[in-house]
Image (cartoon, rainbow, N blue to C red):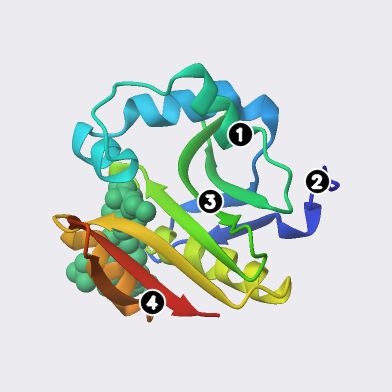
Amino acid sequence: MADYPVELERTRTLFDGRRVHIRPVRASDAEMEQDFVRHLSPDSRYTRFMVTMNELPAGKLKYLTDVDYEKHLALVATEQTGDGRQHQVGSARYVVDPGGKSCEFAIMVDDDWQSSGLAGMLMFTIMDVAHARGLESMEGLVLASNHKMLKFARQLGFSQQRLADDPGTVRVFRKL
Ligand SMILES: CC(C)(COP(=O)(O)OP(=O)(O)OC[C@H]1O[C@@H](n2cnc3c(N)ncnc32)[C@H](O)[C@@H]1OP(=O)(O)O)[C@@H](O)C(=O)NCCC(=O)NCCS
């Protein structure tokens, strides 16, 4: 596993004035990640994971938080709570394809933090990192009914194509 990429840590102010800390995930964030997923609306959980669930199964939780920072890079966005704890409000990740030239991304933002600009901030960060590390393209799979994500991806310059073998899913793609 690569060293923790501390250089990717940053604090940002959103246009509505809220402050958010963005940093690579740690294996010790598993409980925070699970709380984040439990707190999402059922619709946001479904559009992200494409299955109905209330919380992450143990294996999936480990996969999402115990990453190697090379083939799998994940960022979390957190806010500081009144009692000094960190509360997760978003995450974005990419996983490098076996060929080593492209990657697949995923993103999710707490419902109370959607339309805040946080999602764009997370996406621009992972696209910049992927590009700086020599990856040439990024793609993602989105439910055809997920109009919010499709609009968001279009604004970020991703092209869209329905999967021939699964018309309920759209592949979004862009060069980095
Ligand atoms: C899909 C998802 C990531 C999109 O996030 P989002 O919150 O809509 O994205 P943004 O924070 O960029 O907000 C977009 C809106 O805020 C506005 N906005 C963003 N930054 C702004 C700024 N600085 N000033 C003014 N408005 C701004 C945008 O114009 C846009 O408004 P519009 O929808 O009226 O056009 C989010 O809905 C989500 O997490 N969904 C659940 C999980 C999911 O579906 N994931 C996708 C599977 S990979």
**SS at badge 4:** loop
Residue 117, x across and y down, in percent? 38, 64
Badge 1 is on which residue? 65
The residue closer to the viewer here, 134 or 43, is: 134
Counting residues from the start of the chain, the first of labels 2 and 4 encountered is 2
Q: Earlier in the sequence, mark 1 or mark 3?
A: 3
Image point (64%, 49%), residue name: 72
Circle 1: residue type: Thr
- Circle 1 residues within 10 Å: few <14, some 14–19, many ≥20: many
- The span from disc 1 to disc 3 (Cα, nearest Å) is 19 Å
Asked if residue 69 can be seen in this view, the reply is yes
Q: Quadrant of ligand 1?
A: bottom left
Residue carrying label 4:
156
Nearest to viewer (mark 4 / mark 3): 4
First reached walking from the N terminus: tag 3 or tag 2:
2
Residue at left 30%, top 21%? 54
**Cβ–Cβ below 8 Å for labels 4 and 1?**
no
Q: Are marks 1 and 3 in contact (CB under 8 Å)?
A: no
Residue on which the image places disc 3: 20
Q: Residue at 44% of width from left, 66% of height from top?
A: 139
Residue assigned mark 2: 4
**Are there few (<14), some (14-19), or many (20+) residues within 10 Å of tag 3?**
many
Of badges 1 and 3, the one in the foreground is 1
Task: Decide which of 47, 167 is in the foreground and name it.
Answer: 167
Residue 1, x across and y down, in percent: 82, 42
Disc 3 within 8 angstroms of ligand 1 (CB): no
User: How far apart, in angstroms, are the residues tagged by discs 1 and 2?
Assistant: 13 Å
